[in-house]
Image (cartoon, grey):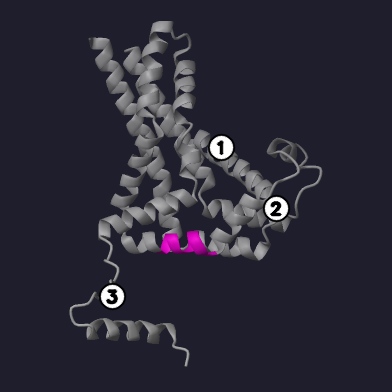
Amino acid sequence: MKRSPLGTLAFAILVAGACGGGSRLALPEPRDEAVALREDIERILELTNVEGVLAARAPAFSRQTAILMGDPSDPELERLIPAVVDEFAYEKLYEDVVDFLMEEGAPELVAQTLEWMDGGATAAVRRIGEEYAPAQTLEEYASELTDEPPSEDRIQLISAWAAARGEGDFFVLMQEALREAANRVHQAMRPGAPSFEPLAGEELEVAQVNSHGAAVIRLLHGYTPAPDQLIRRATTERQSESGQWFTQTYALAVASAIRAAGQRAAERLSQSEAM
């Protein structure tokens, strides 16, 4: 008679117990709560491709700071680039993001996020995007969008998905963090440089609208084969308590990591100037 998996396990335990001094069935050790939380967060970050967001920050930030300075001298560049490359290293930014999420994430919210991100509609849509190879580049698609636009319903659907994902706010927040960090480095290298002025009011609203619009076009282009119903389910997952926690906290974590890297670079450059 074929045993069920549960029956087989019970039989193995009985046999092990009957063998006196024989070996016992090894049961998995429970994960330490902090270790489990970090592992879940790292898996979530892997699924969101955090490396694609953070890895290119150092060279981009060096260029942004050089443009802000206007006419950096060779000696200034020789000081600037090593400091930025070191402090904006992917590993440092990544650890700061992980630490932020661990501090701000309740285990149950993290577990719920991982559940739908790894196995829900969000996961299914992600796989479609990874496997899809558009015939046009994003630039080509955007240039022809007004000639052959998707249906209004599809545009509204993708717009709602982008909003639930926090796309517009995320990129504006990240860009503002980069501007603030570049300003700190600029001031460290050239004391008396203008202070940072964050976007506010109408300027901020315009930046958010433009960022959201660009995200909608990018999602329309990259997820063309994804069916409407699946997008709706993915939107619902993002609108859940865990989805909104992750959307907001992840954006803040990335911005915080960038600001911290800028502060470290500024302090390092200030110290080297004083020597």
User: How many numbered discs sit on the rendered protein?
Assistant: 3
Residue 239 makes an appearance in the image: no
Mark 1 and mark 2 in contact? Answer it, CB < 8 Å.
no
Up-down: is 209 above or below 265?
below
Q: Earlier in the sequence, mark 1 or mark 2?
A: 1
| N-term mark: 3 or 2 | 3
Residue identified by numbered label 2: 224
What residue is disc 1 on? 206
| Residue type for callout 2 | Thr
Q: Secondary structure at mark 3?
A: loop
Residue 48 at what x, y percent from top left? Answer: 49, 49
Could you classify mark 1 by the number of other residues whose Cα lies within 10 Å: few (under 14), some (14-19), or many (20 or more)? few
Q: Residue at x 78, y 40 (%)?
A: 144
Quadrant where the C terminus lies?
A: top left
Q: Residue at x 53, y 44 (%)?
A: 168
The amino acid at mark 1 is Val
Q: Position of residue 118 (x, y in %)?
A: 49, 60
Secondary structure at numbered mark 2: loop
Look at the image and say whether residue 22 sits in the magenta stretch.
no
What are the residue bounds of the magenta stretch? 112-120
Give whichever of 107, 201 is nearer the camera.
Answer: 107
Residue matched to label 3: 25
Secondary element type, mark 1: helix
What amino acid is at disc 3?
Answer: Leu
